Amino acid sequence: MSRLCTLLAAVALLLRAQSVEPAWKEFKIGPVHARQANAINNVRHGEIHTGSISLKALVGIAANIPTVRIVGPFLLDSEYYAVDATLADETRLRMRFRSKDDPVAVDFRALLSRELARRFHLEYHREMRQIQAYLLQPATGTELKARPSTSLMQGRVSINESGSSGNSTLDGRNVTFRSISNWLQGRLRVPVTLAESLPEGTWYFHLQWKTKDDSSLAAALKDQLGLELIEAPQNQEYVVVDHIERLDFPARI
């Protein structure tokens, strides 16, 4: 009987959540907290908690576009803030049980866009540009060497750049090929798209290359993971920031 009551209560809460307008449970933005650890950036679950994030990264989250495809004033890269943002419980519940046709997945980005417009007077537009970009694909003449994962735990990418050994390593646990392409995109500062021939699912990755050596990184991708980057012209969507202002605080130094 108690189990039935719990189930009915959960259903009632979900029905209520579906009728409630999306809102924040918490939204705070302030000066950088250099010592804050355990940053969380999980739009899928409706939350961001970080002691330091660039203004460009916030715009990228709101616009759902990688930072390498955002152009605008210098302060996009120079300004960093601490952010604590969590969607209301009803909205997060709806996100958890949403159907494929339910647009609630964009609610976090829509609310964040509204906050950036209100606080930073953000204005931007989108445009298509033809650029030289990379395509991440299976390397010709070799097999994929990443190991498939069956874990249900949240994926993690760990980077270690050792100055003493001269080598850098990447360890990916329970992550997708898209996660690797996103990391490469940030590392190379060039758009990286994913070949349709790469399989879905989550994988274990281990990669080692010479620090600050892009040719060593490209060779490691092929030899250690069976992947290669192909450079080719592509049409890519860009976000162009037309106007944005710095957010100042009374105690800012």
Image (cartoon, rainbow, N blue to C red):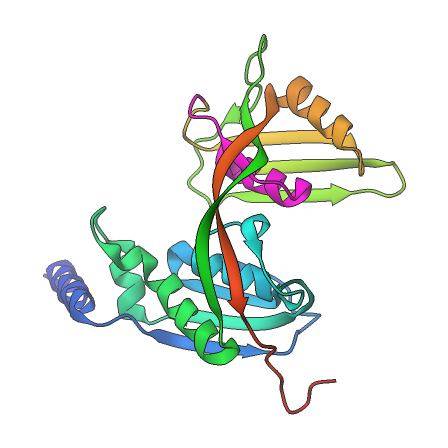
> Magenta segment, which residues?
174-197
* Tally of numbered tags: 0
Q: Residue at x 56, y 44 (%)?
A: 156
Foreground pick, 111 / 26: 111
User: Is 174 drawn above or below residue 70 in the view shown?
Assistant: above
User: Is 128 drawn above or below residue 192 in the view shown?
Assistant: below
- Quarter occupied by residue 9: bottom left
- Quarter occupied by residue 54: bottom right
Q: Residue at x 55, y 41 (%)?
A: 182
Which part of the image, by quadrant, shows the N terminus? Answer: bottom left
Foreground pick, 206 / 251: 251
- In the image, residue 20 lies at what x, y percent? 20, 72
- In the image, residue 171 lies at what x, y percent? 64, 37
Which part of the image, by quadrant, shows the C terminus? Answer: bottom right
User: Is 167 drawn above or below residue 238 in the view shown?
Assistant: above
- Quarter occupied by residue 214: top right
Q: Residue at x 33, y 72 (%)?
A: 88
Is residue 176 magenta-colored? yes
Foreground pick, 215 / 244: 244
- In the image, residue 111 lies at what x, y percent? 37, 69
Is residue 128 magenta-colored? no
